[in-house]
Amino acid sequence: MKDLAGARPEPAFEITVDGRPVSVLPGQTVGAALHAAGIRSWRTTRFGGRPRGLFCGIGVCFDCLVSVNGSPEQRACLLVARAGDEVVTS
Amino acid sequence: MNAYDLVVVGGGPAGVAGALTAAQAGLRVALLDSGARLGGQYFRHLPASFHASREGMLHHGLDRFVRQSGTLERLADLRLGHQVWAVTRQEELLAVHAVMTSDGPHGHPVELPVVLRTRALLIATGAHDRPLPFPGWDLPGVLTAGGAQALLKGNLVAAGRRVVVAGTGPFLLPVAAGLARSGTRVAEVLEANGGLGLAGHPWLALSKAGEAAGYAATLLRHRVPYRTRHAVVAAHGERELTHVSVARIDRDWRIRATRTVECDTLAVGYGFVPQIDLATQLGCDTGHDLDGSPIVTVDASQSTSVPGVYAAGEPTGVGGAVLSELEGRIAGLAIAAELGTPPAGEPPAVPGLLLRRRTRLRAFARALQQAYPVQDGWQSWLADDTLVCRCEEVTLGAIREAQRLGATDARSIKLLARPGMGWCQGRMCGHAVACLAGQAPQPPRRPLAQPITLGALERISDDKPN
Amino acid sequence: MADVIVVGAGVVGAACAYYAARAGLDVTVLDRGPVAGGTTGAGEGNILVSDKEPGPELDLAVLSNKLWRELADGVDFEFEAKGGLVVAETPAVLEQLTALAVKQGVEHTLAGDLAAYEPHLAQGLAGGVFYPQDAQVQPMLAAARLIRAAQDRYGHQKVRLRTGVTVTGFLRSGGRVTGVRTSEGDLLAAAVVNAAGTWGGEVARLAGVHLPVLPRRGFILVTEPLRTPLVRHKVYTAAYVTNVASDNEGLETSAVVEGTPSGTVLIGASRERVGFDRTISLPVLQRLAAQAVALFPVLRDVRAIRTYCGFRPYCPDHLPVIGADPRMPGLYHACGHEGAGIGLAPATGHLLAQLLSGQSPSLDLGAFRPDRFPAEAHS
Ligand SMILES: Cc1cc2nc3c(=O)[nH]c(=O)nc-3n(C[C@H](O)[C@H](O)[C@H](O)COP(=O)(O)OP(=O)(O)OC[C@H]3O[C@@H](n4cnc5c(N)ncnc54)[C@H](O)[C@@H]3O)c2cc1C
Ligand code: FES
């Protein structure tokens, strides 16, 4: 994968997702990091309790909402992750 | 008051070209984009921290774009991470209202209002994917084609391990090719239109560029089957996608036969919806694209019906990155001419050469749109309990009930059954609801083009004029 | 031929149709647009007794409140008997509020401990009055489902809804109205009810009578859906009561905040007379946001995702027009309810149906007479 773009990413850091460590390459969004870690659903809908994760990937659909460092309803696909971010799913 | 000559909203090919052209002509320019990097959807690229030496592999023309962006950074005021939520007229000027998030006192992010005043505005807000609803389309693992692309191009993350790419339009090719090259197993590419297969792909037929041929070659090399007149008509899985129902469909998109394909990811897209919220806020005249999408009407100089307001790129009709960049350049030249600073070394008006190129590219874009229409048959894929509106979880059955109660258009269906009332404000379901109502999609009425905290809204006039 | 043609499929027209059908009459409802596409689709859905000065409108509101409760038993339009809390910033205002509540004579309690009602209310407010009868409906559903309920209960043959039909004139014979001229042809009826809301004046003019109904614009801000409700009741400041009754031309805003079953918070209410101008006004939105945050500081971090405006149908004396038009036999009016048309709809329909079926109305309609306004100055 990295060969594809000749990428030499800077060293990974960690964020936590519901207390569990997840590794992130600097510059990745929270949504991309979760996706890469195999976490693809992190929200349930308010009526049907349906699981949701990334859909549009570009900040338009609001399906990827997640709480980061206590701020609720952040768009995971837009938010660039920072070391130590605490992500809480709902 | 110290206002900008030009504020550009959108940092994709159209916006960057427009801003750069105007700035090079000596105008005082600001460019705003909600993203963390310039590029928009097409030139979405990896952050500098990836030190990607061969990123051009991921998309054509990136190197040039990055160079342009670098120049722009020196000549104009770049405001990334700014979400523009409204534009209003203030006497002779336009006021562009945005919000940006910054770290508050306790590391807790706070949203701040920003207002830029300007003599001219260039709307270069691009487009977003146009999904169609089908049973299971809200399962995690189902992504828009653009979403899969954003993961790869912007984050170097493959959308899944075994991916089906489906929908309609030329955009499916780069998405599938990108995934295949990244080592992802692309199980199938399903194009709902066309009877000719990859060899007869109108992109190949119409363009002399090697771009499409390259994608086709990649798919062949990775033995990815490309099937026309096929569609994913249902997605299945408990809490995540595990398999999809793939149907052979007729020319009206009615199902002929289905089979099951296992996959953990589906990337699906049925064309694009131009983002024209800011233009409709200002009362710009709109029209309809060939595929029925509402678009902003512009004249030869990319000027809308509202004085001082210009539009370039997808908001004037979906036509791709090359056309967008050209429109941006033309708008930049026209704005420079209008505001009275003739660009050095160039005649003030827009050279005829550019206009002729635009005519050709638009004809090409129209031909592509004609080759990939959305046919009504998709409505037959839905069951009564299929979600049409993801945000408010409105089913087809609820929409039909609203219609029986006397809701005869998309707006009153929304009032009775709530599709489009939620977070995305109808961006995902709007096209589908209009079709279900038997209407052409209407120009959006979104006085708030982005969510804004009440705390920021309360303080919009605190921001000192720049 | 119908007994009654109702012009307008807003909540008032729907209520007229419902009660007329219940009285045994044959009804056709016409609307140029869809059902509930007018001001009914642009309001908030409050059913208030708390905000009215003692007098005929309060009597109408109290009757209507009782009727809404009856209707809710059997028709689903998201009726919520949540109660309204009017808060006062200062002790002096609290005193005025309390005095008003006593004069109104409707059920109320002094809310000494505001936090017990609304845990997220701002600190430092002087107190408030709680009105348990105040309620909320989803107005569009209410209009649509009332018509549907009338059809289901009294027969689809007897109650017809025709959308996309514009009334362009009136049919007259021997000095009385005998039907309407429409974009889809002429329709005959023994009586025509003008329930055209903000456009009631235009419809009256088609019948040759003067009715001064004018638009008073209002903006509503809608927040993102909240997972846990922050606002339990309908909460508003005392200033709302004075604004409702004010004659001011210019912009007036007062905080009205309430949650909805879908999880959003609705924030009103602005009032200004600017004709039918839909242009978004950021100063209005800014003020609405500021007032809501002042009342509920937790809303500061909550996002507004939508805003819309509507045009309240108002008459110079702020009272609706309900009753037979003595100037034009066969013509009835049910319009001009300003900011209270949702609340007042059932009583309006009920009383009008009594008139239509030859009964005497159970409430004196004198104050709502259609011919109470001075004649239009002719130029
Ligand atoms: C911001 C705002 C907030 C509000 N909040 C509340 C509230 O909380 N509680 C409350 O009680 N009230 C509220 N209101 C007021 C309430 O919405 C109105 O009083 C009420 O909707 C009026 O209902 P209506 O049926 O008379 O009019 P409408 O709903 O406007 O219906 C009139 C219908 O007549 C049709 N029509 C007009 N002319 C013709 C023609 N020539 N031929 C055919 N059809 C025609 C129109 O298409 C329309 O559908 C609010 C209003 C606003 C603007
Ligand atoms: S995935 Fe659509 S907003 Fe984030």
Image (cartoon, coloured by chain):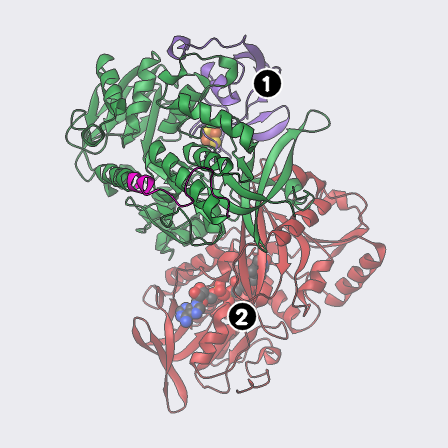
State left or right for residue C295 relative to residue C47: right
Q: Secondary structure at mark 2?
A: helix
Q: Residue placed farthest to the right in the image? A: C91
State left or right for residue C31 relative to residue B213: right
Magenta extent: B340-358
Which residue matches tag 2?
Answer: C348
State left or right for residue B34 relative to residue C9: right
User: Camera-side residue: B280 or C284?
Assistant: B280
Both labels 2 and 1 in a single chain: no
Q: At x 72% / y 25%, what residue is drawn?
A: B106
Q: Is residue C183 magenta?
A: no
Which residue matches tag 1?
Answer: A82
In the figure, the shade used to draw chain A is purple
Query: Chain under label 2?
Result: C
Of all chains in the rendering, the one displayed in red is C
Q: Residues within 10 Å of mark 1 (few under 14, many from 20)?
A: some
> Compared with residue B429, is residue C69 higher up or lower down, i.e. above or below?
below
Q: Amino acid at mark 1?
A: Arg
Q: Amino acid at mark 2?
A: Thr
